[in-house]
Amino acid sequence: LVYHLSVEIYDLTVLFCDRFLKGPKFRRLVEQMTHAARSGKQNIVEGSLENSVESNIKLTGVARASFGELLEDFRDFLRQRGLSIWDKNDPRVLRLRAYREGTQNPHVTHESHESHGIDLSDSEQFSNLVICLCFKEGFLLDRLLASQKEKFIREGGFRENLFRKRLEFKKV
């Protein structure tokens, strides 16, 4: 679920930048936003492929930070244009928070004009959608980090377990 939501956030960020941040004056911002979204997604993948629980925890933390950075870029976009940032109790936010992602959900394409009931041609709605998804992703990543830490406490780390196996081998 964490991965699938990260893919959606990345795809939406690329689409947002294509629609609302055109031209050379936004080049650096577009690079920063798409890099943060991609970094979040890629660090989830890389962490899940690690043998080391410690490395997985570190990369999950990097993913968490990347989505936090992206969230701030979308807030800046709204603030700098005098657009509203939806309150956490706004009915639209509550509807988005209640939505349950599944692995079979279609991803947004450039032809799509709506996602989660949000008009993607409206920059305020679009930004607030991604902000909500980034908060949701942050919540899920925090839970994932907690479970990874608990696993590390219960089972130990990769090197620790290899050393234990080495000692067992030497006893034989």
Image (spheres, helix red, strand yellow):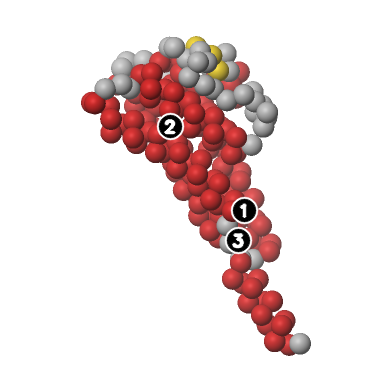
Locate residue 55, reporting x and y percent: 53, 58
- Camera-near label (3 vs 2) is 3
Whether residue 165 sits left or right of residue 138 in the image: it is right
Residue 71 numbered mark, or none:
2
SS of the residue under disc 3: loop
Q: CA distance from mark 3 to mark 1?
A: 13 Å
Residue at the extreme left of the image, as rendered: 25
Specify the quadrant of the image occupied by residue 8.
Answer: top right
Tell which circle, 3 or 2, labels the residue nearer the N-terminal end.
3
Q: Nearer the viewer, residue 88 or 110?
A: 110
What residue lies at 59% left-to-right and 53% top-to-bottom? 49
Residue 148 numbered mark, or none:
1
What residue lies at 43% left-to-right and 12% top-to-bottom? 122
In this rendering, the answer to whether 91 lies above or below 101 is: above
- Camera-near label (3 vs 1) is 3
* Badge 1 amino acid: Gln
Q: CA distance from mark 2 to mark 1?
A: 24 Å
Residue matched to label 3: 51
What residue lies at 54% left-to-right and 34% top-to-bottom? 7
Q: Nearer the viewer, residue 62 or 37?
A: 37
Tell which circle, 3 or 1, labels the residue nearer the N-terminal end.
3
